[in-house]
Structure formats: structure tokens, C-alpha cells
Amino acid sequence: MTSAPSAVAVPNDLEAYWMPFTANRSFKKNPRMVARAEGMFYYTVDNKPVLDGTAGLWCCNAGHAREPIIQAIQAQARDLDYAPSFQYGHPKVFAAAARIAALAPGDLDHVFFANSGSEAVDSALKIALAYWNVSGKAAKTRLIGRERGYHGVGFGGISVGGMSNNRKFFGSLLTGVDHLAHTYDREKQAFSKGEPEYGAHFADDLERIVALHDASTIAAVIVEPMAGSTGGLPAPKGYLKRLREICDKHGILLIFDEVITGFGRLGYAFAAERYGVIPDMITFAKGVTSGTVPMGGVLVRKHIYDAFMGGPDNVVELFHGYTYSGHPLAAAASLATLDIYREEGLFERARGMESAWADAVLSLKGEPNVVDIRTVGIVGAIDLAPRADGVGKRGYDVIGRAFHDEGLMVRTAADTIAFSPPLIITESQIDELIGKLRRTIRAVAN
Ligand SMILES: Cc1ncc(COP(=O)(O)O)c(C=O)c1O
């Protein structure tokens, strides 16, 4: 254990920082401030432990303050702080791409780097459009997302996303976008352990969209294998296979947004492997560096990469990229993180724990206001009935009570509690997490 000061100074004035996706005024009145982290725990500025029930923001899959990652980042900062990503390279970014491609199923064998999930999604959507353009089918421009989907906050991501608060303030968004129906039906799916039996047919909604727009205008479909941000909705059994079949039938690219599900969250390197479905592209971020340095990217299948490689070889093939694509610190952090995943078998560990984890989470059935519980991989989500005075009030109460009274970090979306701890969690820490959740749910009963 590293030595830590007993308390960390907090600035007197919290005003200047406009916090993202946060109720700023409420936070600043009673801040939930963390100063350091180690293993499964955050520590508050007063050095009180807070069990990390969320792997940060679904990213710290290897747990916190992992020494090999720290050392890799430190050494990299000394050796090569930055290298331009356009027309120049550095060895670690090539090594990281090869390692990530080796983890992906099928011929998903090329990696385009970005710095976040949002950038990864926008990159994938642009690659899809450009792919059809260079393939002589420039009329294929429509992008299809799904209701209740979350694909980050770029204009591409919010356009294909299906969360109305993330869309309604921001104008007309991208044109030519349509949405599949979401896959959740509480009456038929409530309290399923893992993927619900009911719902493969929701994939057929793509046929409706094809009938409306015609496949000759549709570039790609993007879905999360598990809708994370709208409350941990696992794909119904058979749904993703059926979606793949319909995309194949009509010549539409399929993109899996694995920003959350990548790197072990569902017990595999990618959910594509769990479901035996090879999408044309996979977006990733978060777990690729266990959250330590921002990094995102897109895995693309060979035929997509190859489609761009036909022109004169002195000409840029894809007019897209970021100053920090494949940043040396991110690449170094990624290599060290992937070593930990492999050496500690964390993906297999998650797979092995899944059933016991699901049983522990489902033991919260019957607690006050619990109307549904969903589990898949090392993810749990609990829907609480909203209070009579407004949707989201009970959920908001959960965050504060869990943090201040129980020493637990969870996430909420309206009145849904979502949790996804680091994959190093032990059995006794699962019990601790469930106990803290149970007391929190009881504390917000009224
Ligand atoms: C499925 C999915 N896509 C994209 C994103 C956006 O990632 P970022 O916040 O790194 O831009 C997220 C973030 O949670 C996500 O869950």
C-alpha cells in the first residue's frame, strides 16, 4: 500500500469547473470528491475508502494503481513524450494495434486509433461512409442506430444514439439517420439472469427500415452488444446473430460499439466473441488502457481496410485522424494493461465469476421499489420505481447516499442503478458491494 496523506487539500472555490453530465449546483454543495485510488478502492480527500462499484466509468477493468501500468506510463513520458500521428509513427502504437487486433475475432485485423469512445464512434461512422464511397456505392449514406443506444457525445454519436436528453438540446443532428426499436420489454424479460430468452425478433425491425429506405441508401447499423448507459440491457438471446444475418442479406455494414463491453466486461476480449458474431467494425476505448490514459479506436475487417488501399501509394487514404491518435503514453499504457489482462487471466476470471455475480445481484430482488434487475458479464443494473414527485429523484438520492453513507461508487441513469466493478473484484468484495447496495436501496425507500 502506498503511503498517503491523511487529507488532501480541496480548492475553496469549485465554481470554475463546469462538470460534464453532472448536476453541478447540487454536487458543489456536497461534493463527492476522490483523491486517490488503489486496487478496488477510491479514497476520498479525507482518506475514507470508497468501493469502486463502477470501474470508474466502466473503464478501470484491471483495478487502480497497477504498478506495471504506472511504470510504463512514466518510462514512456521520459523516452518519447509525443510523436506526430500524421505521416510519422512510433513503435508502441504499431505494437498496440497488433495486440488489440490479435484479441479480436475473425479478420478484424486493423486498428484506427482515437482518444475516446465518442471519437471512436465518429471515426467508425465516417469509415463506413467513406468505405461505400471508395467502393463505388456513394448512395449508401444512411446510418442506423437504436433507441436507448448510447454512442458518446459527438454529433455522429448523438445522431445514431437513442437517448432523448442527449439529443433534444442540440439541433437537427446528422441527417439521414434512423433507429431500430430497442430490445427491452419488462413484462417479458424482468429478472432474467443474463441474456433474456425473449426478444431476438427485435432485430427484424431492420427489415422495416430497409423496406422504408431501401438497402441501396443504407451504409451501416451501429448497436451496443449490451446497452450500457440506458441501464445495462443485455442483447436478447439470438438477437445479434439475427441482426448480422439481415445486414448480410442487404449488404449493410454492422458496427458493434464495444466501448463498454470490450476488454473483459462480458468475460471475453470482445462481446463479438461471446455472441459468435463478427461485425464489420468494433469501436473500443475505456478498458484498452484500464482508464489510465485516454485512448479509443476502431477495429476494422480486412475487406474494409483493403478497400481504401487501391489508389496511388503517395496519397492519404483516409482523410481523418486526431493529433493524439495513438499517443505514446496511451500506447504504452495499453500494452502494459493488455499484459495484465493476459497474465492475470482477467477475462476468463470474469467469465468464471459471472454466474455467482448474477446470483448475488439478483438477491436484491424483493428489496423496496426494485422492479427489475438485469445482469450480464460483470454488470448489474437495478430499476427502482420512480418517486411520485418525479423520475430520477430516487436515483439521484442513491448516488449521494451510497457515496457518503456507504462508501460505494455506483452510477445511475434516472432511477436505474448500474454497477460494473473492476474485474479483480473478490467474492468477499462482491458480498460487500451487494450489502452496501441493499442498505442504500432501503435508505431511499421513501
Ligand atoms: C457504448 C459507448 N459508446 C461510446 C461512449 C463514449 O465514450 P467517451 O465518453 O470515451 O467519449 C460510451 C461511454 O460510456 C459508451 O458507453
Image (cartoon, rainbow, N blue to C red):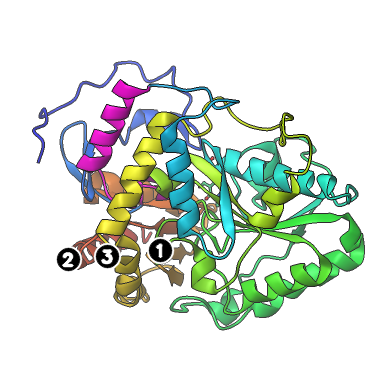
Residue 360 in the figure: left or right of residue 212? left
State the quadrant of the C terminus.
Answer: bottom left
> Looking at the rendered structure, which numbered label has been put on residue 379?
1
Vertical comparison of 329 with 422: above or below: above
Residue 431 in the figure: left or right of residue 97? left
Circle 3 is placed at which residue position? 434
> Answer yes or no: do the residues labelled 2 and 1 have beta carbons within 8 Å?
no
Range shown magenta: 55-80
> Looking at the rendered structure, which numbered label has been put on residue 269?
none
Query: Mark 3 is on which residue type?
Result: Ile
Give the crowd class for mark 2: few <14, some 14-19, many >=20 residues within 10 Å: few
User: Can residue 260 be seen from the camera position used here?
Assistant: no
Viewer-nearest of discs 3 and 2: 2
Q: Earlier in the sequence, mark 1 or mark 3?
A: 1
Q: CA distance from mark 1 to mark 3?
A: 13 Å
Query: Mark 2 is on which residue type?
Result: Ser
Answer yes or no: disc 1 within 8 Å of ligand 1. Answer: no
Q: Position of residue 436 (x, y in %)?
A: 25, 59
Q: Residue at x 66, y 41 (%)?
A: 122
Residue 105 included in the magenta stretch of the image: no
Q: Residue at x 78, y 61 (%)?
A: 252
| Residue 379 quadrant | bottom left
Query: Mark 1 is on which residue type?
Result: Val
Q: Position of residue 212 (x, y in %)?
A: 91, 64
Circle 2 is placed at which residue position? 428
Along the line of sight, the residue nearer the viewer: 309 or 186 = 309
